[in-house]
């Protein structure tokens, strides 16, 4: 895979990180609103979280579309890198690091969301209904 493709993937992964940060921040604010029992803020923050999620879905679609346009060997390698494979060649380290950072932040956001959801809805929570791990 050429350097330009790696740079483009890195740029898109960084954009994802920014949107994940936005989602995480809103989720933290949501948790604080739940703690305060501020129903108006809870509803507002739930709606506000929709925007970064939509943006993340759009970014994911753009990345997927771009990967599909690559030559087969490059597309396979790009998919491997984007799903957490370690770097094998020079120049892949930055992308792998960003992907790992994105994954860690996403996991933190999911855990926080799970705790908030369970606090709000208890056994009726999405997380209880589908018996996700943890």
Image (cartoon, rainbow, N blue to C red):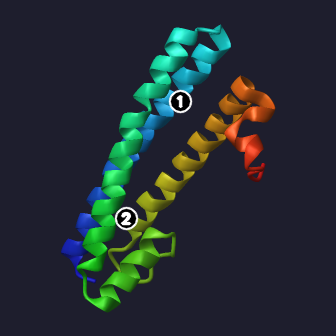
Q: Residue furthest left?
A: 4
Residue at horizontal 37%, vertical 64%? 94
In primary-sequence order, the first of circles 2 and 1 is 1
Question: Which-is-in-front pick, marks 2 and 1?
Answer: 1
Residue at horizontal 32%, vertical 61%? 61
Q: Local crowd at mark 1 within 10 Å, few (<14), some, or many (≥20)?
A: many
On screen, residue 82 above or below 80: above
Q: Which mark is residue 86?
A: none
Give percent across and percent down for residue 41: 50, 13
Quarter of the image holding residue 7? bottom left
Instruction: Say what secondary structure mark 1 lies in.
Output: helix
Can you identify the residue that label 2 sits on? 94
Q: Residue furthest bottom?
A: 73
Residue at horizontal 55%, vertical 22%? 30
Q: Which mark is residue 27?
A: 1
Q: CA distance from mark 2 to mark 1?
A: 27 Å
On screen, residue 132 above or below 40: below
Residue at horizontal 56%, vertical 51%? 104
User: Horizontally, is 127 left or right of 84 in the view?
Assistant: right
């Amino acid at each position: 895979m050429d350097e330009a493709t790696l740079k483009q993937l890195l740029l898109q992964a960084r954009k994802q990180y920014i949107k994940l940060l936005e989602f995480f921040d809103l989720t933290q604010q949501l948790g604080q609103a739940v703690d305060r029992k501020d129903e108006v803020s809870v509803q507002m923050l739930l709606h506000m979280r929709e925007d970064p999620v939509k943006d993340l879905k759009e970014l994911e679609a753009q990345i997927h579309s771009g990967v599909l346009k690559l030559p087969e060997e490059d597309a396979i390698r790009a998919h491997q890198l984007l799903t957490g494979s370690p770097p094998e060649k020079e120049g892949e380290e930055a992308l792998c690091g960003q992907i790992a950072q994105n994954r860690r932040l996403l996991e933190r956001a999911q855990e926080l969301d799970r705790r908030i959801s369970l606090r709000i809805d208890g056994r009726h929570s999405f997380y209880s209904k589908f018996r996700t791990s943890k």
